[in-house]
Amino acid sequence: MSGMAGGGIGCSPAGAILTIDLEAVAANYRALRGRLGRAACGAVVKADAYGLGVAHVAPVLFAAGCRNFFVAHLDEGIALRLHLPREAIIYVLHGLLPASEAECLAHGLVPVLNSVGQVGAWGALARGRGRRLPAALQVDSGMARLGLAPDEVTGRLREDLGAVDLLCVMSHLACADTPDHPANEQQRLAFDALRPCLPAAPASLAASSGIFLSADYHYHLARPGAALYGVAPVRDRPNPMRPVVRLEARIIQLRDVPPGTPVGYGHVARTTRPTRLATIAAGYADGFPRSGGGRGAAHFAGVPLPLVGRISMDSIVLDVSTVPRDRLAEGSFVELIGPHRDVDAVAADAGTIGYEVLTSLGHRYQRRYRAAGEPSP
Ligand SMILES: *Cc1c(COP(=O)(O)O)cnc(C)c1O
């Protein structure tokens, strides 16, 4: 296994292997930055870098030039701080929970202030410490999720913000993966209307999909997550990002069955001809979505192997009848996610989105990281 860093090589044989291509993450970062022109490109690494391992991913992004990182929880920020040099700014998107202000400051994290109360609490801490403290401010431009409502942007708020070193004013788009959705422009105009009512600060509106809207959406700083990890940023369009994950699972049993054989829980599938079945070592407990049962295929040497019946907790049954008998054996690997079926395709077959497939990837897989800068295997 030359060229593979980390991931427990030399351990007992893995039932399934998740390969994470850090060179592809770096390439995706450079590609997004290239689209942005003069705007800076940050990186969202919440949820353990969308399940891929923030301790591996964040330093690669820093080396690629990223200086603005975003996590959701304070705890994620505290953990991330250990993996990044001081000059990296780490924003906590969830803002400040009551009584968490001092801890946020102590770890050198920048809260995204989402409410009048949070602005007040951060301002009070700043006055107590006798200096202005860095923060971002989020306004709600039309998603009703996080951030100040337009009517909360008042003179009183501006006064409280006097104690804050405002690094960024941000908002988030609800429909950016659909470029012609009218909400995109409505949100952009609402954001533009609010900015002059706030202290001057760099602005940030675009996440992955927003980067693929016009340059009007780029402002000073973009916050991509999913596209860095290979998820398609624009619905119904070819995916311009490089795939990052590959999931391979081993065949743990092969059997030949006659026509009419019921397969798996609930007997929801039944063979219609003599069939060779392979049971592989990955299931919904590994985050492979159960709702994708009976749809799509794994692949072996490019040959599709349809999923048969329900997905079990630890295993999936495949129809491998089309592969010559001598090519497959117990222990052979098949590809569940990879060049032949990407995360978005797996997600579509399961009625979900690539984001959910990535963030659900389990921890039973042996993980292998391909280092940034390594040539393709
Ligand atoms: C998760 C998140 C992002 C990243 O979104 P992607 O679609 O994954 O690029 C950006 N901004 C905010 C506020 C988020 O919550």
Image (cartoon, rainbow, N blue to C red):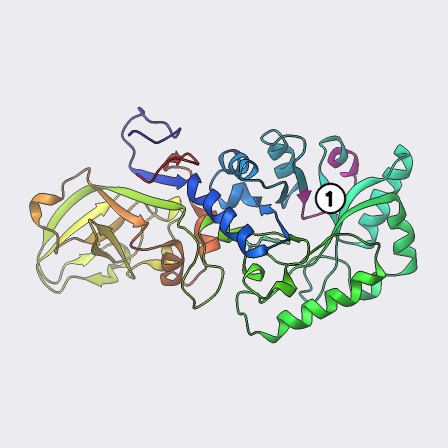
* Residue at 68% from the left image edge and 44% from the top image edge: 92
* Residue at 54% from the left image edge and 60% from the top image edge: 209
Taking the image as drawn, is residue 136 in sight? yes
The quadrant in which the C terminus is found is top left
Q: Is residue 102 magenta?
A: yes
Task: Give the quadrant of residue 319.
Answer: bottom left
The quadrant in which the N terminus is found is top left
* Residue at 15% from the left image edge and 61% from the top image edge: 271
The front one of 142 and 165 is 165
* Residue at 67% from the left image edge and 33% from the top image edge: 87
- Ligand 1 shows up in the quarter that is bottom right
Q: Is residue 165 magenta?
A: no
The front one of 176 and 254 is 176
The magenta-colored residue range is: 91-104
Whether residue 40 is situated above or below residue 9 in the rendered picture: below
Q: Amino acid at mark 1?
A: Pro
Q: Which residue is mark 1?
A: 111
Question: Residue 292 placed where, x, y %?
Answer: 35, 59
Q: Is residue 100 left or right of residue 331?
A: right
Residue at the outermost top position? 10
Disc 1 crowd rating (10 Å Cα; few below 14, some 14-19, many 20+) is: many
The front one of 226 and 252 is 226
Q: Is residue 132 left or right of residue 338?
A: right
Q: Please tell me whether mark 1 sits on a helix, a strand or a loop.
A: strand
Whether residue 101 is situated above or below residue 323 in the rendered picture: above
